[in-house]
Amino acid sequence: MSTTALVLFILIVGMTLVITYWAAKRTKTTSEFYTAGGGLTGWQNGLAIAGDYLSAASFLGIAGAIALFGFDGFFYSIGYLVAYLVVLYIVAEPLRNLGKYTIADMINARFEQKKVRAVAALSTITIVIFYMIAQLVGAGALIQLLLGIDYWLAVLLVGVMMTIYVLFGGMTATSWVQIIKAVLLMVGTVVISFLVLAKFDFNILKMFNDMKALMPLGEEYLNPGVKYTNGIDTLSMMAALVLGTAGLPHILMRFFTVKDAKTARSSVVTATWVVGIFYILTIFLGFGAAAFVGSQDIISANAAGNMAAPLLAQALGGDFLMSFVSAVAFATILAVVAGLVLSGASAFAHDIYGQIIKKGKISEKEQMVAARYASIGVAIFSIILALFAQTLNVAFLVSIAFCVAASANLPVIIYTIYWKKFNTVGAITGILSGLITALVLVAISPSVLNPEPGVAILVGNPIFPLTNPAIISIPAGFLGAFIGTVVSNKRDEKKYAEVMVRANTGVK
Amino acid sequence: MNSIAKDIQAEKKSYDFEKIAESQDFKSLLESKRKFLIPITVFFLVFYFMLPILTSFTTILNRPAIGSITWTWVYAFAQFVMTWILCIIYVKKAGKFDHLAEQIIENEENHGEKL
């Protein structure tokens, strides 16, 4: 590794530690730990949402996918962005008005039932684990490439950093790490995109013409269908992307860091602008990498294309830009995993320990201790899993997380807010049917079972034909909740009146 | 009971949620929210899913629109524009809903004092 890269890495680590030290002094209560005391402004939280959302899978993964597969790679960008309309129009404001720290809090605003809280916490933990392993495995592989250190050491490095941020600085440190990362990522992406555009004489038409002439795939490169040949599978993936975001615990948790629904709304708007501009720029990252690095070099550095963006930076701006982009990628990973630790810890310490085991009879001090122990627990558990999961495909793990979020969480969130007859039985059957359908179908899908040894996790014929089960499991979540509600036929309309008023007016 | 639970209970006493939920003002707020949210949500989901449907089962978007840029890219870009425009529209509209909600709560609070 070059000296420049080392200096930039140390700068980022140093800067985030200073923030953590500063945040630690502001993290005395549980509310400060989980939600930064609800004191973030709209633009701060908007940038933090962008920082929480744009994972290494977005930055490195999409750039690589567009470089290798052309338009098909861009499908991700579209899905990840339009998802914010679902968040804004359906979920953000009622969630802010009803919840406190977790998704389970919001569902329990209507159903004061331990069982409901338990299954909601279970689906949160499942999503966090899959997402976390994906990020850590990706981080390990990436840092191994960038710094030339062993995989286990790379995972440990990221693991220790994320634990320090969360343990001492809670949500305040996590938010500011995410904000800084979002700014760095945007600067890096804009600079590279500018350099790519300059190569094409700032002419988009010329860029498309040149790409068609340059790529071995020719015209095909600019058309869909290079990677995704099964239409139903493509639709299923697109459904998971657009509906999954509104059920991701670490993203939804960010809405509790602002004081009211109005600020929650303005943070989604800021996030949508930042995230949208970023995803537009992924075209330049992808095309640039394809044109100036070449598919062969991209694939030989990493078969999944994850090194496309750093290699492009090197081709355009030499060692310095490459080091900068690598450091940004490192910051990107840190910001996302810190948010994940926090949402996992909140499900364990707040939902399971505080509300279910202790039945809410827990002192402020005990809550803080529980939150910190849970953070360490979640961090250690995910580091251990990541060490054994090195060979798993990162995109596959992320897609499971999105699929479970869309199938188990979103239906119940929507019914809780909008359906008068919805009841506790429906909430439990909804979460469980979405969760179980998604996991079982993935387990028997081509991603897990492949007749050729070494291609997937197990050898055998896939029983379920689609790689992404969302098209079945999302309806299963909605249907499960519906059937549970209708069959049990219990109602609490008085409670629904309260939920409606609180969700729509913001009174407590 | 911890302090949070006490807070919630103290606050709960100050509002009669059922009465607010039954009030004409609240009902019309929900009605106008519904009229705004449902059609737009249906629209953007249909617009969104039409892209993978068209690209997976037809080739009509593969025709060039401007130079080598095909209609697929134009449609994809339109999704970005749609997202930003619907964001702006939402914020404008939500400001009006805020105002209505505040009025409902104010009415309720004033009414409570008179009694």
Image (cartoon, coloured by chain):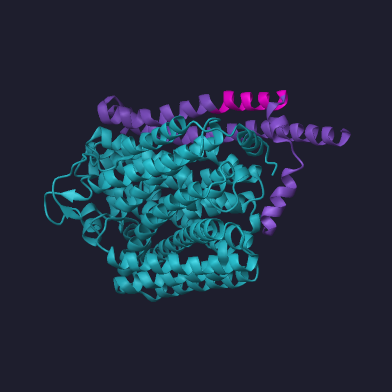
Chain colours: A cyan, B purple
Would you identify the image quadrant in which residue A366 lies?
Answer: bottom right
**Residue A228 in sight:** yes
Residue located 23% across and 40% down the image: A226
Residue located 54% across and 52% down the image: A102
Q: Position of residue B46 (x, y in %)?
A: 41, 27
Q: Position of residue A141 (x, y in %)?
A: 30, 65
Report the number of numbered marks. Answer: 0
Give the magenta range.
B24-37
**Per the image, is A482 magenta?**
no
Q: Is residue B1 above or below residue A224?
A: below
Q: Report whether A123 appears left or right of A449.
A: right
Would you identify the image quadrant in which residue A35 lies?
Answer: bottom right
The C terminus of chain A - image quarter: top right
Residue located 80% across and 32% down the image: B107
Query: Residue most toward the right?
Result: B114
Q: Report whether A344 appears left or right of A111.
A: left
Nearest the viewer among B61 and A402 is A402
Residue located 70% across and 41% down the image: A507
Magenta-drawn stretch, dominant element (helix, strand or loop): helix
Q: Position of residue A74 (x, y in %)?
A: 35, 42
Q: Position of residue A450 (x, y in %)?
A: 15, 49
Q: Report whether A39 appears left or right of A125.
A: right
Q: Is residue B101 above or below residue B35?
A: below
Query: Residue most toward the bottom?
Result: A3
Nearest the viewer among B65 and A453 is A453
Q: Is residue B43 above or below residue A90?
A: above
